[in-house]
Amino acid sequence: MESLLLQASIYLGAAVLIVPLAVRLGLGSVLGYLAAGILMGPVLGLAGAETDDLRHYAEFGVVLMLFLVGLELEPAALWAMRRSLVGFGGLQIVLTAAAVTGALGWLGLGWQESAVLGMVFSVSSTAIVLQSLSEKRLLRTSGGRGAFSVLLAQDIAIVPMLALMPLLASGARPSGTTDHHATEGPAEPIIGFLHSLPGWAGALVTLGVIAGIVLTGHFLTRPVFRFVHASRLPDMGSFIALFTVAFTAFLMMAVGLSPALGAFLAGVVLANSEFRHQLEADIRPYKGILLGLFFMAVGIGIDFRLFLADPWTILALTLGVVVLKALVLAVLAQGFGFRGSDRWLLTLGLAQAGEFGFVLVGFGAQEGILARPVAQYALIVISLSMLVTPLLFAMGDRLSRRRPEAQPHHPDTIDEKGAVIIAGIGRFGQVVNRLVRMSGIQTVVLDHDMAAVQIMRRFGIKGFFGDPTRPELLHAAGIAEASVIVVAVDDRENAIKIVRYARHVRPDIHIVARARDRVHVYELYQAGADDIVRETFDSSVRAGRYVLENMGFSEYEAAQRSRTYYRVDRAAMRDLAELWVPGQPAHLNEAYVARARQLDTDLEIALMQEEAARTRPSPEAAE
């Protein structure tokens, strides 16, 4: 017991110390966990003997992660991904496996070993890539959806890859002697029975299990969840969530399919359930802990003795795998229409080997296809490629910023002028434009997003394609004669640039600007904007008014207090903008802090006066 507690303390302590530091340095939590594992294992020797067992349990974190991803993806959305899933994902697997097999064969490796390693390196790290995409909020981008499609296709492909392994065995092990699926405990009779079935019966059982998961998830989970939640025991939510994932994963493993694929399928089935958000909240903490342990186990398992014995060969092999996969992904991304940052995300984000590579290498060694030295080299190359993945993501971000997407269209010739110029036609600018135009005022709309401009034109609203930060376009739009310019672009730096230029060339023009937050308000104010609208401020005040209406205030009283809050806060923003110092944290600005506290007091007094007026008896009541 003491040794177990000591080992747990070492793992947890290393994670607490190193992971936040890596995040603060902008490297991400994945690299932090890998660094913590390297420090504990190869560097300090505090862990290592238990790595295999730890990885065995920590891999359940990948299962939980795919379940959570499935919860975010409705079946209709999955069907919409079929082109990327089958086309992009399938071609990536086939072409990468063929390229790696050919390269290793050219280096002198036997064709069976080359074929196995081609399959090993054709898959990427679902755990690291999805974790990185989630942290960077890229899952909903075009590149993020493409990467997820490829990862899902790779998870599905694991099944035929495992089935091909015995066929590639060159007689080293008789058929049926592998212990890959060996199981101990109460599951052993079930697994043994399923594996003894003839091929057609096994296929029927597999289809039956998949159909059972879908039907059970659709019809049975809701009454079961209602029954469990009716107990009003918070812990039961975690029990039912973990049971759902664990039992689904077991059923898929029992019929020879990927447990991660089963968990993903269960998540997709439950994506429309009213318990979806509760399931996500119950499982997310366990997923984070287990994934962290998995990454630490990968770091611990890197054999630096082998690396030090032949570092240049291992580095060359790792670089070769990454470059070869990146080339295949770049060609496919280009062919499937991905451009700019999305193409870099796919090219570099998926260029590593994956955690399922450990499974494939182990299975290939058990089947007698991979010699022990070859398997050891493969494992360390997989580990190193996973280790550099966060750096590849960072490289992709940097390349995306340095090489902006080439614009396929030249700026439009602006042949109209209006009293109001609207720079940016996103969700904010659209509302402003419709209100102003329907009030009979001519507007000129500029936006650098060609797709948004074309959509506007389909609805009969004329807009012009071009970068509104370019002075020549602003002059062509009539900034010299316009009365108002509305700055509604998404990029905060571009917004400041437009405001500053407009104020410089037209000191008398009225500038209405959209701001993302308080600091952006101050920046726009100092740049010369007249009216600054925080994009969520009005909606937040309205939400607060609804809360008051449901807490006993009348509609008039709630509206009055909302107006008071709005008036005082707007005035406070202007006062604070005068005191704000660019580049200095607000909490270190003594004058700013003092004025902010005074303004909070003013707001509290104003609202107390509203409350006093609300409870003061009327003259008629006093009589």
Image (spheres, grey):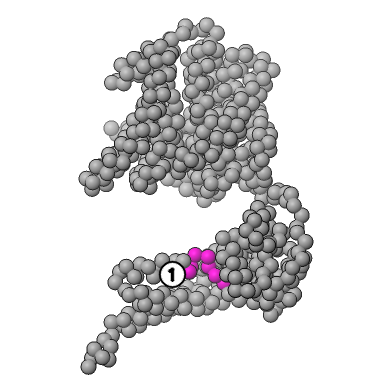
Query: Which quadrant of the structure image shows residue 6?
Result: top left
Q: Is residue 68 left or right of residue 23?
A: left
Q: Quadrant of the C terminus?
A: bottom left
Relative height, residue 138 to residue 81 (above, below): below
Q: Which residue is mark 1?
A: 541
**Does residue 301 appear in this view?**
yes
SS class, disc 1: helix
The amino acid beneath tag 1 is Val
**Measuring 40% from the left and 11% from the top, which residue is drawn there?**
198
Q: Is residue 368 left or right of residue 345?
A: left
Q: Quadrant of the N terminus?
A: top left
> Does the magenta segment cover residue 602?
no
Q: Position of residue 76 (x, y in %)?
A: 48, 40
Relative height, residue 319 to residue 144 (above, below): above
Query: Which quadrant of the structure image shows residue 147?
Result: top right
- Residue lying furthest bottom: 623
Query: Which quadrant of the structure image shows residue 498?
Result: bottom right
Q: Which residue range is magenta in the image?
A: 532-538
**Measuring 44% from the left and 35% from the top, which residue is drawn there?**
264
**Measuring 47% from the left and 44% from the top, which residue is drawn there?**
19
Q: Is residue 503 left or right of residue 183?
A: right
